[in-house]
Image: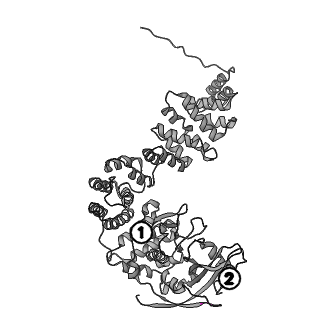
């Protein structure tokens, strides 16, 4: 493909506004498939917001089947201001038919250079001469960071790259091109990307650079290989494995890029299309696959680099280890063997021999030894391997997804009350209640959780979660054993947060009704104090009545017991069995 070119017809549109206008609209367009209505829909769907620094580039698509197009928007500042003195941004949008790109695959960078600085004609389409993709050039840019990013696209959640604010526009565009080169070309009819996007803009862009990743997006930190397994999506794990198997850095990458560029049949990111997407690798064959680079070998290479203080070699091997580890779930036996190397080589020690890479070392090694999530069973294992949990390692552990909220709180507690309070504030009410209810009850955890829950009176989940876990009366009875007054004080505060300052009949019945055993005495006391006068009658009519009903008595026995409870004369008396005391 090197050196070949293709001539293509491109349609165009200009999006902006006049100084007197309030809103941005289509200023002009080539006609054809790019009607003002189509352009407006594209801009609404793929608008990335307006950054402080321009130009920026957004890649998009529209249309189906024979009308499918790939578009590229270049957003720049104009020399005009609107009626309130704000600078007006102008977006020049260009698109080419996907059918032509399928015949002659072209990179996004090539499209950008073809349209950069180009003034659209007065009307009608324009013709551009474009270089065909150079597989070797693109393969030379492939990193584990790009491979992981490509795999994360199959989570079907946005992927956002942070930490690249100072990277030039062209470098960011080339990264997007490299990621796209690791996908079958047919996905370009469904891929949207941006060299910058606002974290607050309501866009539908799959891959973007941003200062902050929006909620729910997959985060990629610039310069780090993302841990694909953290996303918890089978298709993403599978795609990472396929890329790992077909390799990187073994001198044949251009063949894979060329093969993917030739896979031009239209695909989407929908789960139903994933088998066909993965099948592209099957058609690539196995004859060009590299020898397996094992996680143990890479781990030893990392340890050797740490011993030498070789930052460049450590960074390179860490990226490879992160990708190889995340591309396949490892057995407990394999993880134990890796953990033995980590412990023997003291790779989790507090004093890291390569300054500036300690955080990345801990991040990758924790995944190697623990897998996708950090569970309670890992805490002791990691402490043993590290020779003790130090603050830097604990912070790295707090950065890992935790299997249970109690794990996060246990780690935060090791860093002091301030860090614990910070983590408690971040957690959902459901996670907090479940953490406090998890045995064994611990005083510091129960107190921290209760103190936070008492401030969440506006949280609609609070009453439901407390009810599900017995209002935490059990854990409170454990941590304040023999101190009913303390138990009742805490329970009263929790009940006020969940139900308000006064309990009505419904609240009384919900809290104390339908217990298979009698509720704890402190909960009785807290409810009676909040309900006030009439508590005795309510206890008899609801709590004790429900308690007896749930015991499984037959109808006559239940009727007699309920009558006795209410001091009414029963229809028949239970014959009391005499109890004799035997002495001697």
Task: Decide: few, some or many residues near mark 1? Use Cα within 10 Å; few <14, some 14-19, many ≥20.
Answer: many
* Display coloring: one colour
Q: Position of residue 165 (x, y in %)?
A: 50, 69
Residue with the mark numbered 1: 145
Quadrant for the N terminus in the image: bottom left
Q: Earlier in the sequence, mark 1 or mark 2?
A: 2
Q: Please state which of residues 253 and 198 is positioned toward the viewer in this rendering.
A: 198
Q: Position of residue 377 (x, y in %)?
A: 38, 47
Residue 515 seen in this snapshot: no
Secondary-structure class at tag 2 = strand
Residue at far top of view: 584
Horizontal side, residue 241 vs residue 172: left or right:
left
Task: Decide: few, some or many residues near mark 2? Use Cα within 10 Å; few <14, some 14-19, many ≥20.
Answer: some
* Disc 1/disc 2 C-alpha distance (Å): 39 Å
Q: Please state which of residues 490 and 531 is positioned toward the viewer in this rendering.
A: 490
Residue 516 seen in this snapshot: yes
Residue with the mark numbered 2: 27
Q: Position of residue 303 (x, y in %)?
A: 28, 60
Q: Position of residue 422 (x, y in %)?
A: 51, 48
Placement of 155 over or under 264, stated as above or below: above
Q: Are marks 1 and 2 in contact (CB under 8 Å)?
A: no
Judged by depth in the image, the label closer to the viewer, 1 or 2, is 2
Placement of 416 over or under 132, stated as above or below: above
Q: Is residue 124 magenta?
A: yes
Q: Which residues are magenta?
A: 117-125
What residue appears at the point 57 percent right and 31 percent down from the top-left corner?
488
Horizontal side, residue 160 vs residue 296: left or right:
right
Q: Main secondary structure of the magenta part?
A: loop
Quadrant for the C terminus in the image: top left
Q: Is residue 59 magenta?
A: no
């Amino acid at each position: 493909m090197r050196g070949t070119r293709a001539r293509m017809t491109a349609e165009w549109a200009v999006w902006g506004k006049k100084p007197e206008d309030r809103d941005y609209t289509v200023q002009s367009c080539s006609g054809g498939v790019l009607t003002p209505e189509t352009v407006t829909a594209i801009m609404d769907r793929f608008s990335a917001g307006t950054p402080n620094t321009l130009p920026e580039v957004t890649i998009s698509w529209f249309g189906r089947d024979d009308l499918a197009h790939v578009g590229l928007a270049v957003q720049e500042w104009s020399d005009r201001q609107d009626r309130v003195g704000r600078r007006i941004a102008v977006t020049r949008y260009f698109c080419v038919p996907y059918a032509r790109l399928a015949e002659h695959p072209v990179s996004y960078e090539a499209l950008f250079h073809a349209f950069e600085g180009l003034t659209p004609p007065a009307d009608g389409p324009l013709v551009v001469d474009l270089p065909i993709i150079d597989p070797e050039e693109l393969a030379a840019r492939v990193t584990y960071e790009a491979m992981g990013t490509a795999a994360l696209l199959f989570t079907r959640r946005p992927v956002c790259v942070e930490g690249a604010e100072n990277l030039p526009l062209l470098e960011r565009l080339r990264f997007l091109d490299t990621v796209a080169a690791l996908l079958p070309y047919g996905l370009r009819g469904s891929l949207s990307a941006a060299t910058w996007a606002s974290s607050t803009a309501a866009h539908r862009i799959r891959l973007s650079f941003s200062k902050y990743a929006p909620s729910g997006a997959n985060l990629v930190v610039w310069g780090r290989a993302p841990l694909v397994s953290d996303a918890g999506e089978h298709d993403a794990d599978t795609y990472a494995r396929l890329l790992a198997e077909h390799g990187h850095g073994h001198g044949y990458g251009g063949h894979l890029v060329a093969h993917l560029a030739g896979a031009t049949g239209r695909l989407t990111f929908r789960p139903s299309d994933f088998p066909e997407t993965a099948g592209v690798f099957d058609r690539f064959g196995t004859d060009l696959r590299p020898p397996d680079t094992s996680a143990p070998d890479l781990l030893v290479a990392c340890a050797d680099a740490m011993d030498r203080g070789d930052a460049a070699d450590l960074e390179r091997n860490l990226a490879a280890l992160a990708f190889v580890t995340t591309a396949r779930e490892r057995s407990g036996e394999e993880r134990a063997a890796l953990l033995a190397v980590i412990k023997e080589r003291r790779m989790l020690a507090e004093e890291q021999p390569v300054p500036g890479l300690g955080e990345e070392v801990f991040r990758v090694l924790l995944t190697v030894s623990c897998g996708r999530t950090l569970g309670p069973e890992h805490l002791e294992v990691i402490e043993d391997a590290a020779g003790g949990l130090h603050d830097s390692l604990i912070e790295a552990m707090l950065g890992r997804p935790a299997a249970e909220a109690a794990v996060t709180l246990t780690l935060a507690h090791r860093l002091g009350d301030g860090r614990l309070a910070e983590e408690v504030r971040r957690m959902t009410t459901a996670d907090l209640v479940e953490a406090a209810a998890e045995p064994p009850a611990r005083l510091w955890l129960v107190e921290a959780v209760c103190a936070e829950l008492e401030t969440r009176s506006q949280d609609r989940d609070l009453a439901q979660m407390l009810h599900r876990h017995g209002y935490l009366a059990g854990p409170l009875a454990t941590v304040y054993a023999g101190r009913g007054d303390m138990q009742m004080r805490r329970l009263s505060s929790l009940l006020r947060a969940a139900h308000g300052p006064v309990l009505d009949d419904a609240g009384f019945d919900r809290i104390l009704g339908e217990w298979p055993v009698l509720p704890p005495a402190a909960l009785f006391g807290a409810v009676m104090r909040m309900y006030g006068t009439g508590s005795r009658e309510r206890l008899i009519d609801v709590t004790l009545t429900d308690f007896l009903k749930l015991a499984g008595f037959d109808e006559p026995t239940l009727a007699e017991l309920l009558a006795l409870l209410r001091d009414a004369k029963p229809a028949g008396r239970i014959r009391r069995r005499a109890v004799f005391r035997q002495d001697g």
